Image (cartoon, helix red, strand yellow):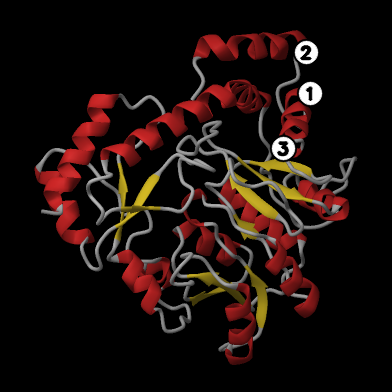
Amino acid sequence: MPSAEAILPYLQRIDAKRWYSNFGPMLIELEARLAARFARPTLACTAANGTQALTLALLALNAKPGGLCVMPAWTFVATAHAAIQAGLVPWFVDVDPVTGVLDADHVRARLAHAPGPVSAVIPVAAFGQPLDPAPWARLHEDTGLPVVIDAAASFDSVSAAPVPTMVSLHATKSLGVGEGGFIASEDPAFIDRFRALTSFGFMGDREARFAANNAKLSEYTCAIGLTALDQWPSTRTAYIITAQRLRVSLLHTPAVRFQPGWGLDWTSSTCVVALPEGATGAVEASLKAQGVDSRRWWGLGCHRAPAFAHCPADFLPVTERLAASTLGLPYFADMDVDQVNRVALALAQALG
């Protein structure tokens, strides 16, 4: 996260303007800079957090309440919370065994076997990896189903949004503002409705046209975001360097596999590795005994959370395998060589 010293010039601009929230100049600048990162003409609209952004996107797409929302079981619980807040019921479907994400053709085939009417689909980009939106745009065109991509951790790898795409700006993400997120879309009408849903249903006046929320970002949060964007080239370089150090330090531990392209073509704020099948529990315990923390970022799968026990789920063998064979390692932009080596040595020891 940016330092107070780095943010100060933006805070001084806020003082000079005396505009503190409600789509001020900082927010307009932040959204323009976020949208400019996309390859094709795209609009970006911010929200209070990524979960709110997913929920409001489903509402903006008029996803029919009470229907099923197709999503991977291999995801963070926020995906399911967002669907429920939008009046939908999560339907957990298994992911591809190679990519670890939903496959559009598999979803298309499963629609005929859905345990009820389907209202929307949320594909998830796992742990920041790139996700091709084109198959999901085709699914939307062919079926008419609303599709929102949950790319919460994919700030570095998202470059197109033919269907609405959510990116989180939480403090744990590679570009963070504390709490925040944004939706990217090539559809101006969708963005207009989404923006109104973040602001009481107002559309350029003070008339509430439909039930909505208050999910705006303040100018102070946008000041942090603008500073983080200023620093992004150096922040990204630091993440890449740390990732490559981890890769090199584990060259002689072939049982550990990184996500394809991680630290080479793209980066994120987490390091999630694949381990020998079923090894996560033992490795986690060994690392803990050596004083090295780790994370099962998505637990045993979203479908295992008590909050979603009532939700329908497909047969999920790939999700179950991933839950028992992946682990998040310590990883941060300013991680030094000694820390990298300590993690690598502890992991090698854990794997015997």
- The front one of 25 and 275 is 275
Q: Which residue carries the number 2 mark?
A: 17
Q: Secondary structure at mark 3?
A: loop
Query: Distance between the Cα atoms at labels 2 and 3?
Result: 27 Å
Question: Disc 2 residue type?
Answer: Lys
Q: Residues within 10 Å of mark 2 (few under 14, many from 20)?
A: few
- Residue 27, located in which quarter of the rendered image? top right
Give the residue drawn at x 90%, y 40%. 205
x then y, percent, for residue 288: 15, 45
CB under 8 Å between discs 2 and 1: yes
CB under 8 Å between discs 1 and 3: no
* Residue 91 visible somewhere in the drawing: yes
* Outermost residue toward the bottom in this view: 113
Q: Which residue carries the number 1 mark?
A: 25
**Front label number (2 vs 1):** 1
Question: Disc 1 residue type?
Answer: Pro
